[in-house]
């Protein structure tokens, strides 16, 4: 399957949980001339939380970006029919406008619920209300991360969350909120794949997918 | 259509926060125009026929000067990743970018033009063809700029590369635009129609070209 096809299927919303899966078969990804991911297979279905572990440069971010359709696969197959929510290294926030405007704009381009109360609820999920009306450029790293993660509260229940180092820059209270929100999402039938060095959603006993490191 | 307008709304909000950029662009436009008479000298017989071309060259440079950061900021912020996963495709995103850029650069420039026409002593009956041609021309230049910005995205020294790529392509717009502006047979001249044809072609092509350029650029340079 080409990169393009994959994205088309990813945009469709699946109503039943039967379609709620992520299948990766024999996936290989090249970065430059280096084969970062070789013949990786992985399966996830509704309610699964999976931690992506491995040393720096093992291809965790590359894998997440490939699933998100932002990098082409050199070989293999990814199929996923549910909406994908991606929170990467970069938060996807414009520094010039406020966190609230950023979040509302994001919800609108995705066609999610955008009433004032829905945005307020999403902002309060990570306790960002106090600084949500300030321009993002004056905020700290952790505050930006919390605004980026507040998107998760607007995501549809069946969506696949791809989280790249979601804990980076977060304080302990926010990490607990993140664990909580991830577990709730899994209980509601969603899927989470998170690259992380920290203990993540430990109470839910997440599965783990280990990437061994550079393959040359 | 809602995601499309949401993208325009977001860009306009950001442009409003960075509104000093607009001031810089307008001053740049005025300065280029003001420099020509200084270099040529106070000779009315030489200066009079130069009014319209000078406005066109100044508009071309001022519009294209603002393009280097069109996509760069969104790529750095990670907004492009969010766009690629959203209901708004990269093509519509590029078109939304073009519209918001025209509203914040082309339109203010057009509003300034009568003032510049007065300064250059362009006769009043020439104003309507000049403004109509500049309206279409500025929209065409904006679309060209979107192509250039998308192609040079990810390349180091993108700004210089973009000028090299785009300025030759701007030649048809410049030729038909200046001819249409100086038409003495009313507003609708054959040159204006040709200018419109170039614009229509760009309108169809620019979003597609920009979308595939952004797709490739991201693949090669992504984090």
Image (tube, rainbow, N blue to C red):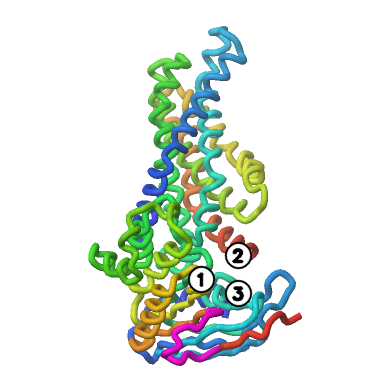
**Closer mark to the observer between disc 3 and disc 1:** 1
Is residue B76 inside the magenta stretch? no
Mark 2 Cα-neighbour bin, 10 Å: few <14, some 14–19, many ≥20: some
Mark 3 Cα-neighbour bin, 10 Å: few <14, some 14–19, many ≥20: many
Residue depicted at x 38% and y 25%: B128
Range covered by the magenta-colored residues: A195-208
Q: Position of residue B76 (x, y in %)?
A: 54, 57
Q: Are marks 2 and 3 in contact (CB under 8 Å)?
A: no
- Nearest to the observer: residue B130 or residue B197: B130
Would you say A107 lies left or right of A42 here?
left
Q: Quarter of the image for the N terminus of chain A: give it.
A: bottom right
Q: Position of residue B114 (x, y in %)?
A: 40, 23
**Marks 2 and 1 on same chain:** no
Q: Which disc, if any, is residue B222?
A: 2
**Under tag 3, what secondary structure?**
helix
Label 2: chain? B
- Nearest to the observer: residue B10 or residue A188: A188
**Under tag 2, what secondary structure?**
loop
Looking at the image, is B65 positioned above or below residue B112?
Answer: below
Label 1: chain? A
Residue depicted at x 43% and y 56%: A139
Q: Are marks 3 and 1 in contact (CB under 8 Å)?
A: no
Looking at the image, is B207 positioned above or below residue A120?
Answer: above
Looking at the image, is A43 positioned above or below residue B57?
Answer: below
Mark 1 Cα-neighbour bin, 10 Å: few <14, some 14–19, many ≥20: some
- Residue placed under numbered mark 1 in the picture: A168
Is residue A207 inside the magenta stretch? yes
Q: Which disc, if any, is residue A62?
A: 3
């Amino acid at each position: 399957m080409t990169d393009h096809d994959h994205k088309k299927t990813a945009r469709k919303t699946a109503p039943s949980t039967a379609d709620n899966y992520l299948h990766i078969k024999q996936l290989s990804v090249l970065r430059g001339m280096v084969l970062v991911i070789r013949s990786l297979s992985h399966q996830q279905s509704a309610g699964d939380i999976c931690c992506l572990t491995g040393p720096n440069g093992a291809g965790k971010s590359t894998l997440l970006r490939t699933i998100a359709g932002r990098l082409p696969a050199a070989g293999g197959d990814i199929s996923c029919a549910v909406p994908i929510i991606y929170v990467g290294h970069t938060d996807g926030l414009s520094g010039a406008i406020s966190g609230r405007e950023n979040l509302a704009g994001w919800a609108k381009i995705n066609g999610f619920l955008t009433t004032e109360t829905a945005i307020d609820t999403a902002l309060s999920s990570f306790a960002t209300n106090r600084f949500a009306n300030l321009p993002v450029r004056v905020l700290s790293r952790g505050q930006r991360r919390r605004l980026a993660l507040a998107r998760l509260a607007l995501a549809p229940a069946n969506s696949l969350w791809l989280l790249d180092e979601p804990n980076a820059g977060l304080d302990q209270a926010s990490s607990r909120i993140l664990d909580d929100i991830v577990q709730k999402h899994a209980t509601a039938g969603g899927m989470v794949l998170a690259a992380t060095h920290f203990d993540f959603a430990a109470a839910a006993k997440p599965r783990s997918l280990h990437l061994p490191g550079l393959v040359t | 259509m809602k995601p499309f307008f949401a993208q325009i709304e977001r860009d306009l909000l950001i442009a409003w926060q960075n509104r000093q950029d607009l001031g810089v662009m307008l001053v740049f436009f005025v300065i280029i125009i003001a420099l020509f008479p200084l270099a040529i000298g106070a000779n009315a017989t030489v200066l009079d026929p130069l009014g319209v071309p000078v406005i066109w060259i100044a508009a071309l440079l001022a519009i294209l000067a603002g393009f280097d950061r069109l996509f760069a900021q969104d790529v750095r912020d990670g907004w492009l990743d969010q766009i690629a996963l959203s209901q708004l495709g990269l093509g519509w995103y590029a078109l939304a970018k073009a519209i918001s850029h025209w509203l914040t650069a082309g339109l203010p420039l057009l509003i300034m033009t009568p003032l510049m026409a007065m300064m250059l002593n362009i006769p009043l009956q020439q104003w309507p063809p000049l403004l109509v041609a500049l309206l279409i021309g500025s929209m065409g230049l904006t679309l060209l700029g979107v192509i250039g910005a998308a192609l040079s995205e990810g390349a180091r020294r993108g700004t210089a590369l973009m000028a090299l790529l785009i300025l030759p392509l701007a030649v048809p717009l410049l030729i038909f635009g200046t001819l249409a502006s100086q038409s003495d047979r009313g507003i609708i001249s054959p040159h204006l129609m040709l200018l419109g044809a170039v614009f229509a072609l760009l309108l169809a092509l620019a979003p597609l070209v920009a979308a595939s350029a952004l797709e490739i650029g991201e693949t090669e340079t992504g984090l």
